[in-house]
Amino acid sequence: MTRFPALTGALLVGWVCLAAGATIRVDGSGGADYATIDEGIEAASDGDTVLVAPGVYSGHRNRNLSFEGKNLAVLSEGGAGAAVIDCEGLANNRAFVFQSGEDSTSVVSGFVIRDGAFALGGGMSIVGGASPAIDDCDFEGCAADRGGAVYVEVSAPSFRRCGFSGCTATQRGGGIYCLESSPTIVGCTFSDCDAPEGTGGAICCHVSSAPLISNCTFAGCDAVWGGALSCLSSSPHVEGSAFLRCTVTWYGSAVYCQQSSPSIVYCTLVGNGAPFDAGVFCLSGASPAITNSIIAFGTEGAPVFAIDGDPWTTRSVLFANAGGDSLAGSHADNLFTDPLLCDVTHDDVRLCSNSPCLPQSPQNPWDQAVGARGQGCGNCVAPVEASTWGRIKFLFR
């Protein structure tokens, strides 16, 4: 075992607080303490760090990895993306399982987790009160019935700066499925995640789940219900997040709410489309609160639609949605004007310097920011009219 290896850059900054224990090095090419990740974890004790050299790790001792109740850090030595755990699309093979009460000092950081396949959590399963920290990891092409990338049950993990790409759940949660759980999901990106036969293309929150979702981006996700986010008897708090080009077969192009009361604050929903809504759909007494948000340029439906529910929309900007800009439920103090986004056709939903969504704008009656992204370009030459949007909306298909 090697103590205090030479680390550089961002990894060193994040690793300093973990350096009290021993450092165990893993290198599949040889020349380290162990050749597989499982051997490194098995040899480690509480407080130790398992440092994994760059490379692709596959085979039975590099998947279905368990900390077995020990609080460890398993880190990619070369930083984010340098070490790949390839589950090879084989049934019942995922990268990690946490099931023994591991706490937030259990860390997985910097890995690409590829082609995992398991019924519950294609890439990772976190159950039984575990709360590991998953940082700077990318989940690619993972598949499951629930939780294409990650399955969370009665647990409270954190995910920071993670990417979820091309992950699929046939039933619920193409990216993350959480049941009676409160994960923290910050600075993550969900792209082209799907629930082709179910709900929650990117995230499904189910039965008393209350995740914090902050500063995330959802792009090109789809499902039958809830293209990006599905809330089923749950109350997530969503802030500073962008929902782009998400679609569904039926309800909730970006967000689907059933018997739920999520808060949606400082968010931007652009280019989403469903038969009834261009943003948020409410059913069975759902009562989301939508505040300081933008819902614009939807390819189908109205911004907020309810069959049985009472959404509340305030201090928000609604514009050029294909089904009109009427709001279901209770609403007050909103603007119906072009938000002036830098380049919606290329998913740049930052604000032009003359946007009414900037707090300093003379058009902004609240002196508060609106939307998920701040200023990103100069003045827009002219507002995009609804008729113009009708000619270019095919770009979101």
Image: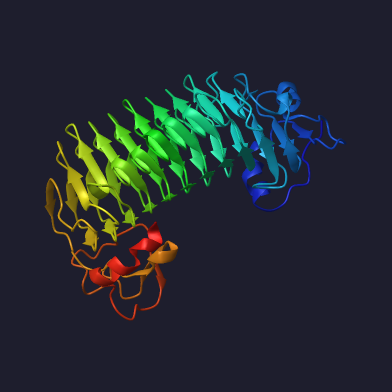
Task: Report the label total.
Answer: 0
Q: Is residue 385 above or below residue 11?
A: below
At which x and y percent is residue 218? 42, 49
Image quarter where the C terminus lies is bottom left
Image quarter where the N terminus lies is top right
Decide if residue 373 is in sight here: no
The part of the image, by quadrant, that contains residue 333 is: bottom left
Q: Residue furthest bottom?
A: 381
Residue found 21% across the figure and 49% down from its top: 304
Left-right relation of 237 to 92:
left
Visual colour scheme: rainbow
Left-right relation of 366 to 26:
left
Q: Is residue 105 above or below residue 344?
A: above
At which x and y percent is residue 263? 27, 43
Q: Is residue 93 above or below residue 382?
A: above
- As rendered, which of 72 and 161 lies closer to the eye? 161
Residue found 24% across the figure and 42% down from its top: 281
Decide if residue 80 is in sight here: yes
At which x and y percent is residue 166? 52, 43
Residue found 59% across the figure and 34% down from its top: 107
At which x and y percent is residue 41? 70, 25
Residue found 68% across the figure and 40% down from its top: 84
Q: Is residue 93 above or below residue 348?
A: above
